[in-house]
Image (tube, helix red, strand yellow):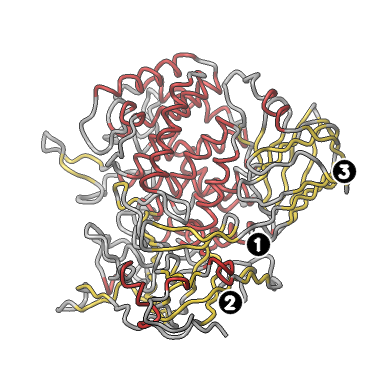
Amino acid sequence: MKAIHALAIFLSVQCLPAQHEKFSDVPLNRIHPEGWQRTFLVKQREGLTGHLDTICEPFNKGGWVGSKEDWKPPFYKRKNDKGEDVLCWEPFEQTGYYYDGVIRCGLLLGDQFLLDKAKKQIFGAISEASPAGVIGAGIPDRWPHVPFFRAFMADYEATGDPVILEALSKHYENDRFSLAGCRSIINTEQLVWLYQKTGKKSFLDRAVDLYEAQAARRSDRLVNDFNDLKSDERQDIHGCTFHETLKLPIILYLATGDSKYLDAARNGYRKLDKFHMLPDGVPSTEEGLSDRTSLSAHETCDITDFVWTTAYMLKATGEVEWADKIERAVLNAGMSCVTRAFDAHQYLATLNQVVSTVGSCQSPISNPSWNAYCQRQRPWCCTGNVNRFFPIYVGCQWLKGEGDALVKALYGPGRCVHHAGGKSVTLREDSVFPFSDTIKITVEEGAADFPLHLRIPTWAKNPSVRVNGVEQTGVESGKFFVVSGEHKAGDVIELSFPKEVQIRQLEMNGMFVDYGPLLFALPIASRSEKVLLNDLMWGGTPADAKDLYGYNMVPDSKWKYVLALDRVNNHRIQVVKNPIPDVNDPWTTKNAPIEIKMFGLEMPNWAWLYQEFKPFNESQPRMEPVTPPLPPRGCMTMTPVLCGKPERITLVPYGSTTLRLAVFPYWDVQDIPSFRENQMDYR
């Protein structure tokens, strides 16, 4: 094997493939997660992903298959403008999300239980199509087809089953439903995919015509107009819709090579970073795109949708930036929005969560349970979509490059079977990434000649690459490094990605702590109580399992800390790397693999807040504690008077937490008021 450097990489990607993509997907059944990644997927299988269709609505109502005669208002049918009962589209969207997650998890695990569950829906829906081949013809919208058809696409990529390709082709060739309205236009994703698989230009022409006609429609919050996307102005638009429609110009660029589409998408991302991006890697979205404070929230749907769209950007551009974004979103926001057993999830997650109960959500438009970890949330979109984010992440770790190239875009333990020059080669990553700085990639079996693109993360400080023990030159953060030539069994590539602690500011009031791709937080011990959802809040869904549950978590340790910053002494940071007792399950707050120790000062006067909450089974409302905002910035000058002595606090990876403080009020030790005689004593 030999190395080629950044200039050669740049020149090589100018010869665009027919579809103008730098990278493309590896079939999921050729990617085999191991270590903690396999453990996490198995927890999905044993938790929500494997059992939603038996425990709660709408997932236990048959999905896309079977008669809908017994479906009733208000959640499954509604009146149309003629006063007739018609199906609601929402249950089809939510189950579409779910089965896409099921099949991706099943393909990655090679799990027949999950594959059978998803294929029953895919092929059942095909068999129940209209005489013309229209799938779900009775649904009064075409947006729900988009998430459901992604499951078809994943299965086809893995199996090449011609029944799927023929069924999707017939559906789009014969469906007379307009795709011009609101989210229905997102079917552009499937139209372009069909063009790529069949070569039928009529699919591409329809996709372009739909998108170009969009400028005439600026009627509601579900339209992400192309001209608005190109503007410098903030867009007040439904968050999930922004992410879903942001990928459309990327997809059209992949098919046409027209740079105007990619330029618009870049601008959309620029606006997300400027106005909405939170430290855990996902934009704030409280239904609509929102603000950036310690209590700003995002939906679980937005974690998945942001990662899905950003994966398209990675494949379109071949740029490291987009892999960095996927990594940060999943390892922080994604890992923290579910319980460790993957048996419950949040609808809305906030950076600071000192309490999480059925009743603690502060969003004025919310269901009170949205901030709690529950088996299901209402509406059910996040309950379906939570099953997708991690399979998407694992599926993006290995990608195909131009020609026979293989791309290592994201890191995590596992194997990939790669085909090059008519030969098969298996590569294996051994690591406990993101907790270790070192990664080893071994050619496990086979031999073939192909370029291996290795992502060097932007956050890596002084990265290095060794090929069969030989140190390589030209390794740069934020670029791909390519190892070319023959790769044969026994070859070893060793990567080193040292991390550095960064203290960053969120707006005016708060500071947060980064270490490589990881956000760190103060873990708050909790008293956790399992509660029955039907006792506390009736969701209007009587077919839910009677023992459907959530968790009430209240703090059981101190959390009212002001972060003491000391620029002269590098903030007195201490990074502790602990032995990992279980490399297959390292996401823990006790003896975490990495701890960051800093100084904090307890502020007793940082007061709790309360809000009114009326449980379904109680006659009177009660006052429920909620997470308070940060203290006003101005009062931090009085920290030496208001707070106790400095003490060491221990921060852990945010993704392993439920209750936490991730954005801290802060005080600089150089800002001692003049009436104080001495500096703070850190001894």
What residue did someone put label 1 on? 435
> Counting other residues with Cα less than 10 Å from the Cα at mark 2, is it few (<14), some (14-19), or many (20 or more)?
few
What residue did someone put label 3 on? 489
Give the quarter of the figure containing the N terminus. Answer: top right
Left or right of 423 on screen, residue 461: left
Coordinates of residue 648 in the picture (x, y in percent): 54, 80
Coordinates of residue 566 in the picture (x, y in percent): 52, 70
* Residue at x 56%, y 41% (from the top left corner): 321
Q: Amino acid at mark 1?
A: Phe
Q: CA distance from mark 3 to mark 2?
A: 39 Å
Residue 245 falls in image quadrant: top left
Q: CA distance from mark 1 to mark 2?
A: 14 Å
Q: Amino acid at mark 3?
A: Ala
Q: Secondary structure at mark 3?
A: loop
State the residue in front, 56 or 36: 36
Q: CA distance from mark 1 to mark 3?
A: 27 Å
Residue depth check, mark 1 versus mark 3: number of the one nearer the observer: 1
